[in-house]
Every structure is written in C-alpha cells, then in structure tokens.
Amino acid sequence: MGYPKKGQGAAEYLILLGIILIVSLIGIVLLGGFTESTTNAVDTQTKMYWSSTRPLAITEWVQTNSTLYIKLKNMDQKRVILKSIIASNVTSSFGTGWTFAPGNEKTVAINGLTQCSANYDYFSYDIYINYDTADISNITFKGTKPLVGKCIYD
C-alpha cells in the first residue's frame, strides 16, 4: 500500500478550487445575461409598492415622449385633495387641488421630463405627492421606491 506523495493533497485541493471558480464564473455570466428577468422583477416590485401606498396609490403609469401619465386612486376612507405631484424635480400643480372621494381615480400628466429616446427605454423617478386631508393640510409623501417603467416613444 502506497502513501500519497508530499504535496499531493494540496495540489488536489487547488485543482478542485479552480474547478469550483470556473463553474461559479460561468454561472455568473449566464445569470448576467438574463437582464430582462431582473427588470421584470423590478417592475413587479414597483407595481406592488405603489399600488399599496396610502392614501393615494399609483395604480398605472406610462411615459410617452416627455410626459408621464399617472393614475392615482384614493385608498383612504376620507376625502383627499391633491395639491401637486413631483417627479424628479418636475412639478405638476393643481391650483386649489383635485378632490378625490374614497375609491376615486384620476389620471395626472407631468410634462417636461427627460424625453424618451426609443420604445422600451426605461425611466425612473422619485415621486413626491403633496395633498390635504380633512384633518391635516400640506402633507408631503415621498415614495421609498422610485417609479420605474418602460417608455412609449412616438
């Protein structure tokens, strides 16, 4: 019965480590190639977050050229008055405000944003919603997640 030569265990260890590294690198390259699944996950997370914000939820949105269209819904049991909405430092104001009864939906347009350069170009905006309730005036809500989506280019 023979004994392994000196250093043979270390060499086998290095070979195994090299194989594991190569397999890991191939896995990372393959996962990096599936960026569409990553963007779909971001879209899903964004939709889940913004559709659950209160009192005003954002249920749908799309950007065409330099205009972002947002559908807002009052998720509260009380009336809400929308004063303004800001998307990445571009403000859309509503004068004395738009009144949303409980469950009411309205579509808001924010003009003057960065122009979409092509179909399926992506946008991402930090959103601030300024509103009044029957009890409190001048409330500003900032979303913890940006509003992201695909552009429709005309």
Image (cartoon, rainbow, N blue to C red):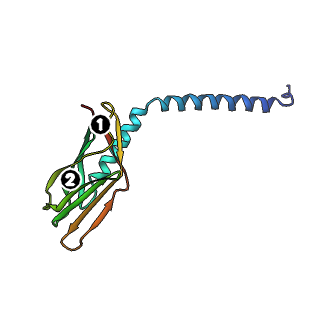
Q: Secondary structure at mark 2?
A: strand
The C terminus, quarter of image:
top left
Q: Nearer the viewer's eye, disc 1 or disc 2?
A: 1
Nearest to the observer: residue 149 or residue 83: 83
Crowding at mark 2 (Cα within 10 Å: few <14, some 14-19, many 20+) = many
The N terminus, quarter of image:
top right
* 145 in relation to 83, above or below: above
Q: Label 2 is placed on what type of residue?
A: Leu
Q: For the residues marked 1 and 2, what is the alpha-carbon distance in whole angstroms?
A: 19 Å
Q: Earlier in the sequence, mark 1 or mark 2?
A: 2
Nearest to the observer: residue 8 or residue 71: 71
* 71 in relation to 25, above or below: below
Q: Which residue is at a point 53% across and 29% down the rendered structure image?
A: 29
In which quarter of the view is residue 80 placed?
Answer: bottom left
Q: Which residue is at a point 36% across and 50% down the rendered structure image?
A: 146
Q: Label 1 is placed on what type of residue?
A: Cys
Q: Residue furthest top?
A: 1
Dot 1 corresponds to which residue? Answer: 151
Nearest to the observer: residue 113 or residue 33: 113
Horizontal relation, residue 21 to residue 127: left or right: right
Dot 2 corresponds to which residue? Answer: 72
Query: Looking at the picture, how far across and down is residue 109, in whole percent?
Result: 21, 48
Crowding at mark 1 (Cα within 10 Å: few <14, some 14-19, many 20+) = many
Label 2 near label 1: C-beta < 8 Å? no
Q: Which residue is at a point 35% across and 38% down the rendered structure image?
A: 122
Horizontal relation, residue 23 to residue 129: left or right: right
